Image (tube, rainbow, N blue to C red):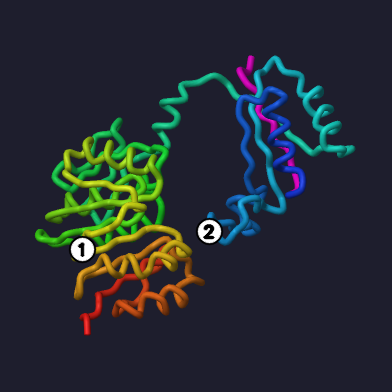
Amino acid sequence: MAAWINLKIRASADYAHIMSDALIELGALSCAIEDSYLNSENEEALFGEPNIPSNTIWQHNTVESLFDAAVSIDIIINELKTITGLPHIDYTLDTVEEQNWVALTQSQFEPINILDKLWIVPSWHTSPNPDAINIILDPGLAFGTGSHPTTHLCLEWLIKEVNINDHVLDYGCGSGILSIAAKKCGAKQVIGVDIDPQAIIASIHNAKENHVDVQFYNSELPLTFEADIVVANILSSALSVLAPLIAKACKPHGKIALSGILKEQIVMLTEIYSTWFDLNKPIEREGWILLSGTKKSIS
C-alpha cells in the first residue's frame, strides 16, 4: 500500500496561491507551485530579480501536494471547490511508496568535473581523481552546488586566472564554492561576502570541510578589501546596482569576472562596467554569460 498520495492540480495564476494555502490548511504534508510547462518549449522564464513583483507567478501552474494515503482526496477536492468557488478542478493522482529518501537524494548528485582539473565531490562520494583540485560540497540551503552553468563558467575562469599571490574577492559567495576554489587554485588571500546570513553560515562550514582559510563577511558591512581578482556570480540587477562598489574593490589592472547574466542583458552590463573595465568578449553557456575584464588605470 502506498505511503502517500501526490495530488497535482492545474491552476491559473489567479488561483495557484489560494489553492496552495488551502491545501496546507487541509492537511497537506508539503505543497509546491511550478510552471505547468516546465522543461518544455513553452516554459515561462521567471527570475528572482528585484524589479519583478514578489507575487509574480506563471500563467499556467501545477500545484503539487503530498497527503497521507488515508486521506480522502474527494473531500479535499470538494473543500477546494468551496474555497475557490470553482465548479471543476483539474487534477491527477500519483502514489508515492516508502523508500530510502536519503539514498535517493544522494544518487541525484554525482561528482562534477571542471576542465579535468577540478572536481566538486559530494561527501558520500570518492573523488574520481584524488590528484586534482577537489572541493567537498554537499547540496544545502545556500546557492552553489557546482551544477549551474554560471558556477561552471566562474570556476573555469578561476582555474585559468588565479595566481599564487592573488587576493580574491567573491562577491555574493552563496555556498562559498568560488571562494574555496580560488583558495585551492593558489590564491594568497580570499574573502567572500554575501547579504544572506545562511550563505555565510554555509560558506564557513564548507571552507572548514575543505580545510581552507577563507574569511566570510556580511556584505552590508563596509568593504575595505582591495582585490587582484573580483568574481561575482549574482543576478544582473544586483550587478547593475553594485557596479561602483564592485569596481572600487578591484585594484587597477586587476581582473573581474561577472556571471548570473542572461544573453539579453549583455549590452546593459557591458555599458555599465565599461566605465571601469576593459571588457573581453562574453563567454556563453546554456544562455548564461560570463563577462570578464581588466580594471582601467586610475587617471
Q: Nearer the viewer, residue 106 or 27?
A: 27
Outermost residue on the right side: it is 87
Please provide the residue range marked out in magenta: 1-12
Q: Looking at the picture, does residue 291 appear above or below residue 140? A: below
Q: How packed is label 2: few (under 14 Cα within 10 Å), some, or many (20 or more)?
A: few
Left or right: where 109 falls relative to 23: left
Q: Secondary structure at mark 1?
A: strand
Give the residue at x 32% y 65%.
246
Q: Which residue is mark 1?
A: 227
Q: Which residue is mark 2?
A: 49
Specify the principal SS of the magenta part.
strand
Give the residue at x 28% y 36%.
205
Q: How packed is label 1: few (under 14 Cα within 10 Å), some, or many (20 or more)?
A: many
Q: Nearer the viewer, residue 246 or 260?
A: 246
Give the residue at x 44% y 65%.
261
Residue 76 in picture, x, y percent from top left: 78, 25
Q: Looking at the picture, does residue 126 appear above or below residue 118? A: above
Mark 2 and mark 1 residues within 8 Å of each other at the beta carbon: no
